[in-house]
Image: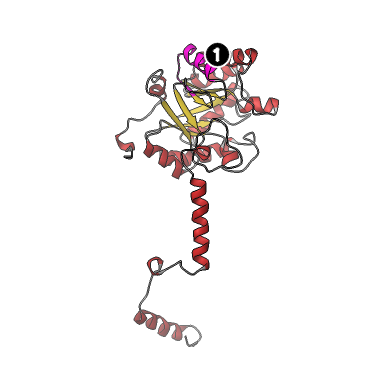
Amino acid sequence: MAETSSNSRRKITPALIRARKKGAPITLITAYDYPFASYAEQAGIDIVFVSDAFASVGMGRENTLSVTVDEVVYHTRAVRCAVSSSLVLASLPFLSYTTPADAVQSAGRIIREGGADAVEIEGSADIAQIVQALTKAGIAVVAHVGLTKVLAARTGSYRSQGQDAESAISVIHDAIALSEAGAFALVLECIPDRIAAAITELVAIPTIGIGAGGYCDGQGLVTQDMLGLFDKFTPKFVQKFAALGDAARDGFRMFKQNIESAAFPGSAHTLAIGDDKIGDIVARLNGTVGGTAY
């Protein structure tokens, strides 16, 4: 398959994403470093998302609740260096947006210091005022409903949402409230496909599903999940599009075997020097290093 040239692509902006409602499907993947962000850019991915999931899939932590604004800024800066056409989206960490003022300060740092184009904020209709404050400050916002870190912190579980009437109605109300508050897109995570379809019809902005079925305006996945780089747990909704973890393990094993059998490094990997130059070096050393003969 031919590689997409980022130089020939139009810069993806919040306005262009919003205009994709019921248009060409939106693609979103996560990235936390320069290499994977660069591959996503080359592939023509619409949104490169510096999700706080890096705490789990990149750092081995139990959950994402310990992520700091400093950490998001650090990873966003690396991603920004690789991306010129895709939209760079970054998470607002847990407890970094408890008030509108806190939210604007945290998001401002992620945009100014990290280089993000927009921020992602998770929660229910209760954070509509936060979304309004961010958009009023000129910060583009993607809202995230369904399974969120806020809900996980409150309940202690990461269960799918919207599977009963009360929960489904709550998620729908959350989505409507946050879309009306000024978000330019909505991430719907771990909710039934028909609930996601209802939300997609009810809101005027695009929906991006992560485990929310095929009726959304776009789809997203965590890179480590979809490329087989995280083996602690694979969500049901993930399809593995590559097996890079297996390839990496095989590569490390081959490296070890080559070292142990002296097959590496070979002449092709070695900087050689001629006998005449070695002779000159030895002569000079004999005259300068305590008269020691080499």
Q: Could you tell me residue 118's position as x and y percent?
A: 47, 28
- Is 218 situated left or right of 93 in this image? left
Q: Could you tell me residue 170's position as x and y percent?
A: 61, 14
Q: Is residue 72 above or below residue 101?
A: below
Q: Could you tell me residue 39's position as x and y percent?
A: 41, 41
Task: Please say whether residue 205 is one of the residues in the magenta stretch.
Answer: yes
> In this picture, which residue range is highlighted in magenta?
193-208
Q: Residues within 10 Å of mark 1 (few under 14, many from 20)?
A: many
- Is 11 situated left or right of 294 in this image? left
Camera-nearest residue between 94 and 283:
94
Tell me what residue is drawn at x 53 percent, y 62 percent.
256
Task: Please say whether residue 238 is one of the residues in the magenta stretch.
Answer: no
Camera-nearest residue between 235 and 39:
235
Tell me what residue is drawn at x 58 percent, y 33 percent.
235
Tell me what residue is drawn at x 48 percent, y 50 percent.
247
Camera-nearest residue between 165 and 290:
165
Q: Residue furthest left?
A: 8
- Location of mark 1 (residue): 177
Camera-nearest residue between 9 and 233:
233
The amino acid sitting under disc 1 is: Ala
> Which quadrant does the N terminus fall into?
top left
Most prominent secondary structure in the magenta stretch? helix
